[in-house]
Image (cartoon, grey):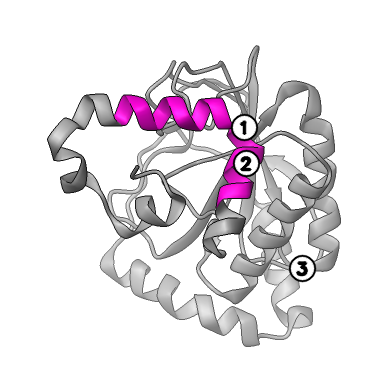
């Protein structure tokens, strides 16, 4: 499986929220334990704010973002993520990315956040959580004994995409082993050769070959039925 959720359920321990907007960063916690509700009007507002925030003067927007961050409530809780933060019942038009790194390299990966923030503003928070290893070959939490998952969620605009690409590049260039959350944004949209190189660097040739062999065994004559443009672009359809 290429899913990171098929392994052990992760637990959130007072998950910190890192504000990475308006050119500064701060640590804090938020959560209410209540399930969220986003109305259709709220979705429309988010769609509107995405492109507008890129055009806004950060000197004007910054104080509002800072105040919203300061108003976050501290939470001292242990439990499943959905129990602490709640779940919206409507999908939002947001930009989202998740990167898993080994526990012994997470401090370097965190420093890369601050370095990237100084270079590229982005409208949204980040999360840091720690999860046990999954037996899934391409899981985001593939590192033992524990994986640090760093995620960014925010408005879907050019700033968010630029930030995500720069952050992933910094982690990769620092030689930090990493894995993607396959249900979120990644940087595997380059030329086929570059994609293959990145996948080999991330997972290793043996893991990729094993995954493709197991896929062929599982799907047999129906393999083509489950192909799509993304799988073909990655070279994972063979």
Q: Earlier in the sequence, mark 1 or mark 3?
A: 1
Q: Which label sits in the foreground, 1 or 3?
A: 3
Alpha carbon distance from label 1 to label 3: 24 Å
Question: Residue 137 appears at what percent x and percent y?
Answer: 47, 25
C-beta proximity under 8 Å, tags 1 and 3: no
List the residue tagged with mark 3: 120
C-beta proximity under 8 Å, tags 1 and 2: yes
Measured along the vertical axis of the image, is residue 167 above or below residue 176? below
Q: Earlier in the sequence, mark 1 or mark 2?
A: 1
Measured along the vertical axis of the image, is residue 26 above or below residue 60? above
Residue 98 found in image quarter: top right
Residue plotted at (61% across, 57% down): 194
Which residue occupies the foreground of this view, 163 or 140? 140
Which residue occupies the foreground of this view, 51 or 3? 3
Residue plotted at (85% across, 63% down): 118
Q: Which of marks 3 and 2 is nearer the N terminus?
A: 3
Residue plotted at (33% across, 24% down): 214
Residue 127's disc is 2
Q: Which label sits in the foreground, 3 or 2?
A: 3
Q: Is mark 2 on a helix, strand or loop?
A: strand
Residue 20 found in image quarter: bottom right
Which residues lie in the magenta part? 196-215
Which residue occupies the foreground of this view, 215 or 24? 215
Question: Residue 130 appears at what percent x and percent y?
Answer: 62, 24
Question: Residue 207 appears at what percent x and percent y?
Answer: 52, 26
Q: Residues within 10 Å of mark 3 (few under 14, many from 20)?
A: some
Which residue occupies the foreground of this view, 150 or 192? 192
C-beta proximity under 8 Å, tags 3 and 2: no
List the residue tagged with mark 1: 15
Residue plotted at (56% across, 54% down): 195
């Amino acid at each position: 499986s290429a899913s990171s959720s098929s392994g052990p359920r992760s637990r959130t321990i007072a998950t910190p929220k890192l504000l990475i907007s308006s050119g500064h960063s701060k640590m804090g916690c938020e959560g209410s334990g209540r399930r969220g509700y986003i109305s259709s009007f709220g979705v429309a507002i988010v769609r509107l704010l995405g492109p507008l925030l890129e055009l806004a003067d950060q000197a004007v927007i910054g104080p509002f973002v800072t105040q919203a961050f300061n108003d976050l409530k501290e939470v001292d809780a242990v439990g499943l993520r959905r129990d602490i933060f709640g779940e919206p019942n409507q999908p939002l038009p947001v930009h989202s990315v998740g990167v898993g790194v080994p526990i012994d390299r997470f401090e370097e990966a965190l420093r890369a956040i601050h370095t990237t923030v100084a270079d590229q503003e982005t409208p949204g928070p980040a999360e840091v959580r720690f999860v046990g290893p999954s037996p899934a070959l391409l899981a985001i939490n593939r590192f033992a004994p524990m994986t640090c998952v760093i995620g960014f969620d925010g408005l879907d605009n050019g700033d968010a995409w630029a930030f995500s690409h720069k952050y992933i590049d910094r982690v990769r260039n620092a030689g930090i082993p990493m894995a993607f959350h396959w249900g979120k944004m990644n940087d595997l949209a380059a030329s086929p050769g570059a994609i293959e190189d990145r996948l080999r660097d991330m997972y290793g040739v043996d893991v990729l070959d094993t995954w493709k062999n197991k896929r062929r065994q599982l799907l047999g004559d129906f393999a083509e039925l489950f192909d799509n443009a993304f799988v073909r672009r990655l070279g994972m359809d063979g």
